[in-house]
Amino acid sequence: MTDVVVALEALRSDAAIWDHAADGLNPPKGAIDPLGLTPADVMSYAASHGFDRLYNQTSATMQDMINQAESNFRNLAGALRKAADLYERDEEQNQHHITRAGGH
């Protein structure tokens, strides 16, 4: 196996790891969605002091952070795959030029 092939496999393997990490965020995303509170869900004292709003804001912030992480992980995986594809294409073109220059 050439160094280039090994490097391409490593890039694509790393991309798969980042995709897997993004997929791993689905359970926490699904767990946060049903956790909203209404004033009826908390004691009147807590509701009058905005506990339900604060709780829901915190939940939304956590959901946002998880969504951003998933997006970043997917973008990183895509960038790694794109780099591997470009690297592979360039290597194939270089091999073609070398072969032509050698008269083969």
Image: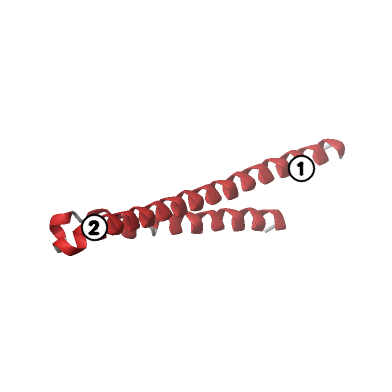
Instruction: Examine the image and state in which quarter residue 20 appears.
Output: bottom left
- Which amino acid, mark 2? Asp
Q: Residue at the location (40% across, 51% down)?
A: 64
Which mark is first along the chain, 1 or 2? 2
Q: Residue at the location (68% across, 46% down)?
A: 87
The quarter of the image holding the C terminus is top right
Which percent across, then down, holds residue 92? 71, 41
Q: Which residue is mark 1?
A: 95
Residue 80 lies left or right of residue 3; in this view the side is: left
Circle 1 SS class: helix
Which percent across, then down, holds residue 49? 24, 60
Residue 73 lies left or right of residue 27; in this view the side is: right
Q: Residues within 10 Å of mark 1 (few under 14, many from 20)?
A: few
Q: Which residue is mark 2?
A: 52
Q: Nearer the viewer, mark 2 or mark 1?
A: 2
User: For this rendering, which residue is in front, 44 or 9?
Assistant: 44
Circle 2 SS class: helix
User: For this rendering, which residue is in front, 39 or 34?
Assistant: 39
Instruction: Examine the image and state in which quarter residue 2 appears.
Output: bottom right
- Which amino acid, mark 1? Gln
